[in-house]
Image (tube, rainbow, N blue to C red):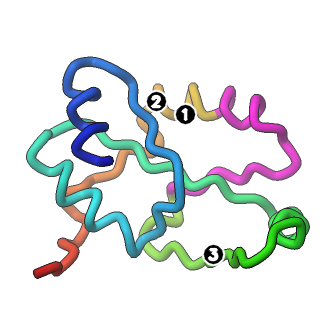
Amino acid sequence: MTRTAAAFAGRGYQVILEGIFGPWFLPVVADELRPTRLAVHHVVLHAPLDVALSRVQRRIGHERDRDLGPYAAHVVDTGLRDAEAVASGLDSLLDRGAFILDISRVPSPGLP
């Protein structure tokens, strides 16, 4: 997925990878992207605890881990805003480079 995204981004397309990319997964993503020298933004959408709990209670089998360690600066509190409001606010923040991830500082995954 990361290689495909990098291929599109390298050709000038704006690419968004959406999913659960916790701190445990970033080393794998960073390892793939280091050679591309592409600017990488990392955004964590974050709702207040009561909103998150309400959302989780409507789902079965999902838990939320809030400890993001060094990636805490990439959090965007979604609060009670709808998806359109969150996306609109993200546009200007991304344009300003507010969430650029220095992938050279992300540890290697240590995979064999």
What residue span does the magenta drawing correspond to?
Answer: 74-89
Rendering quarter of residue 5: top left
Callout 1 crowding tier (Cα within 10 Å): few <14, some 14–19, many ≥20: few
Question: In the rendered image, which residue does mark 1 sit on?
Answer: 93
The tag earlier along the polypeptide, 3 or 2, is: 3
> Rounded to the nearest whole Å, what is the CA distance between mark 1 and mark 2?
5 Å
Element class at badge 2 = loop
- Count of picture labels: 3
Question: In the rendered image, which residue does mark 3 sit on?
Answer: 66
Residue 33: percent from left, percent from top? 20, 48
Q: Which amino acid type corresponds to the residue marked 1 in the rendered image?
A: Leu
> Rounded to the nearest whole Å, what is the CA distance between mark 1 and mark 3?
22 Å
Q: Nearer the viewer, mark 1 or mark 3?
A: 3
Q: Considering depth in this image, is 46 or 19 the residue closer to the camera?
A: 19
Q: Which amino acid type corresponds to the residue marked 2 in the rendered image?
A: Arg
Q: Which amino acid type corresponds to the residue marked 3 in the rendered image?
A: Arg
Residue 76: percent from left, percent from top? 64, 51
Identify the residue at the far top of this view: 12
Give the label on residue 96, or none: 2
> Rounded to the nearest whole Å, what is the CA distance between mark 3 and mark 2?
25 Å
Q: Which residue is drawn at 60% across and 34% down?
A: 90
Rendering quarter of residue 88: top right
Q: Which residue is drawn at 47% across and 41% down?
A: 98
20 over 93 or under it: above or below: below
